[in-house]
Amino acid sequence: MSRRTSAGHVNSAHLTRAGKNHHAFAGAACQAPAFSGAPGMTIAGTPLARNAALIEAGLDVSLSPSAALGIFYNAEIASDVEGHGVSGRLNWRF
């Protein structure tokens, strides 16, 4: 949802928090079927973070009746791993 406001006004602000709890396939490799006549493949990757907190915060500010600027922060925080990100956007309606 977007709405036009005068310059400098906050269009929207949000803060979200959540949690996730992964226990399936901890440390296990998966076996994938082979193509016709080829040997099988083993697929392995980084284990999923367990008992992680997910955090998101953002702010949209109107620069003019046709332009808005937004900046957002997101994080996934667990006991043994952290991931943080910042993103921005510029919307211009014409």
Image (cartoon, rainbow, N blue to C red):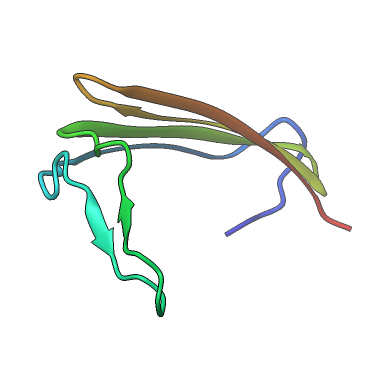
Look at the image and tell me whether residue 5 can be seen: yes
Give the number of callouts. Answer: 0
Instruction: Say left or right for 23 vs 71.
Output: left
Instruction: Say left or right for 31 vs 25.
Output: right
Q: Nearer the viewer, residue 9 or 70?
A: 70
**Residue 69: horizontal and vertical position, in percent?**
71, 36
Q: Nearer the viewer, residue 55 or 59?
A: 55
**Could you say which quadrant of the image residue 28 lies in?**
top left
**Residue 9: horizontal and vertical position, in percent?**
66, 34
Vertical arrangement, residue 71 with respect to residue 1, above or below: above
Q: Report the quarter where the N terminus lies.
A: bottom right
Look at the image and tell me whether residue 70 can be seen: no
**Residue 39: horizontal and vertical position, in percent?**
35, 65
Q: Residue at x 31, y 36 (%)?
A: 46
Instruction: Say left or right for 74 vs 22.
Output: right
| Furthest residue in direction right, as rendered | 94
